[in-house]
Image (cartoon, grey):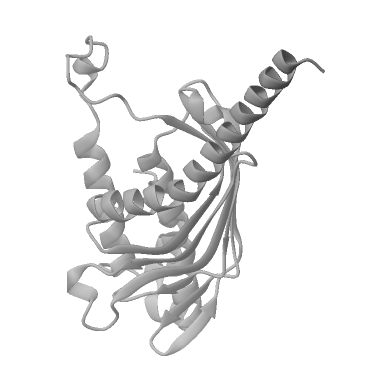
Amino acid sequence: MSIKKKILLGLGIGVVLVVIIGVLVVGFFLGDVIKLGMETVGPKVTQTTLTVSSVHVGILTGSGGVTDLVLGNPDEYKAKAPNAISVGKAYARVAPFSVLSDKIVIKSVEVRSPEITFEGNPLGANNLTKIMDNVNTFIGGSTPKTAETNAPAQPGSPKPAKKLEVDDFLITGATVHFNGATLPLPDIHFSNLGTGPDGITAGDLVKRVLGEITTATVKAVIADAGNAGKALGGEASKLGKSLGSLFKK
């Protein structure tokens, strides 16, 4: 092999190594960036604390994981329990190249063994519905008006948030702590969110997930009351009919 070819081969190998090292370095620090983003934006959405122990992202594989995510309780419920939801492990798979497009495709999300602490009245004010109210307020306040939607972007204005598609979302092994009891929740599973061209927003996804958790939790708390149906009379049956639509508003 000529000296010229050897030099070119060496340069080519060097470029490949630089790219590989760059991907590894970005992947190493990207988890910290996402963690910071979650802990910065999350409290603005829920109006509660949100902490994450660590975030792992595999750029080449499209896999990711979150460890020890803890969502705090609203202020009025902190005296009895500081946290509303804690998740030991959560995993996600993303179509890698979709992060470069206008819509990120999340192939699957699995949340394992979350612990939910319920405080308040299942038929009235409680910590989970308060968090839902906060999320709804944030989404409503951050949604641009229709008249502004088609207006050209002004210089310096923030870019529109990326849309999401979630093909499969599973919450499994969840438990609820209420009045000293620990209640199991059935698996929560939904799919094909945002499959259309418009996708869904991150706020809509948070609203859907919290809504499903809240609905399942309230049902479990009422069922655990034993004779709740007799004690509550018509209210119990009325609640059962309304729970499905309560969090779609």
User: For the point 38% across and 54% down, which residue is it?
Assistant: 35
Q: Position of residue 213 (x, y in %)?
A: 46, 60
Q: Position of residue 107 (x, y in %)?
A: 62, 40
Residue 188, quarter of picture? bottom right
Extreme residue toward the right, this view: 1
Q: Position of residue 64 (x, y in %)?
A: 56, 50
Q: Is residue 220 visible?
A: yes
The one nearer the camera, 190 or 236, is 190
The one nearer the camera, 166 or 9, is 9
Residue 36 vs residue 47: left or right? right
Task: Tell how many labels.
Answer: 0
User: For the point 19% across and 38% down, which residue is it?
Assistant: 141
User: For the point 73% across and 17% down, which residue is it?
Assistant: 3
Q: Where, quadrant-wise, is the C terminus in this rendering?
A: top left
Q: Is residue 226 visible?
A: no
Residue 203 vs residue 146: left or right? right
Say if 223 sits above or below 196 in the image. below
User: For the point 19% across and 22% down, which residue is it?
Assistant: 157
